[in-house]
Image: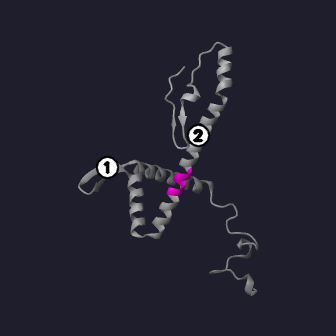
Amino acid sequence: MADEDKVGYRRPPKSSRFKKGQSGNPLGSSRKARMRQRQQTLPLVDLVLENSQGLVPIREGDRRSTISMKEALIRREAALAIQGSRLALKSCLDRIDKAEQRKLAEVLDHYQAYRDYQDHYPARAKACRNRDLPLLCPIPMTCTSTITLSNYSSPVR
């Protein structure tokens, strides 16, 4: 027998060896294994959500109160950032920046809606009058709006 034909420890038969260019498991993990893995991760998600919604007792000076876990974590991260943790500082600044951008987008959307309402009100009011329908919205000239605040204090006419 030739040297290559020997079968034994660390020398499997030639017919069962991996072919060149093929991986050991071409189909990936089995379906059952993937399902088991998916079932194990779902309860973890539930646990994380439960814990994030729970209340945590805190003490600020002489005062004691309870806050949500999310708020406690945000406060802790802010405290670490103030103490000089670079990672906490970057995370805090990123979170604040995203929150400010979301708030600005929301305010701009409200302002744009107000401006559209003000611009299109005469045509809508005329259409309601032509159909003998009551006006169900305030007159825009009696409403005030700035880029940060909208106030609709007019009575419905």
The residue at the point 41 percent across, 61 percent down is 78
Magenta highlight range:
96-101
Instruction: Assess disc 1: are there few (<14), some (14-19) or many (≥20) residues with their C-alpha within 10 Å of its C-alpha.
Output: few
In the image, 126 versus 78, the foreground residue is 126
Q: Is residue 34 left or right of residue 62?
A: right
- Circle 1 residue: 66
- Three-letter code, disc 1: Thr
The three-letter code of the residue at mark 2 reads Tyr
- Single out the mark in the foreground, 2 or 1: 2
- Along the viewing direction, whichever of 128 and 26 lies nearer the viewer: 128
Note whether 93 is above or below 110 in the view shown: below
**Mark 2 packing: few (<14 Cα in 10 Å), some, or many (20+)?**
some
Q: Which residue is mark 2?
A: 111
What quarter of the picture does the C terminus occupy?
top right
Magenta segment: does it hold 146?
no
How far from the left and from the top, in percent, is residue 107? Answer: 55, 43
* Mark 2 and mark 1: Cα distance apart in space: 36 Å
- Residue at screen point 46% across, 49% down: 46
Q: Secondary structure at mark 2?
A: helix
Relative image position of residue 100 (x, y in whole percent): 53, 52
Q: Quadrant of the N terminus?
A: bottom right
Q: Is residue 25 left or right of residue 44?
A: right
Q: Residue furthest front?
A: 141
Q: Residue at x 47, y 70 (%)?
A: 86
CB-based contact (under 8 Å), mark 2 and mark 1: no
Helix, strand or loop for the magenta stretch, by majority:
helix
Establish if 5 lies above or below 73: below
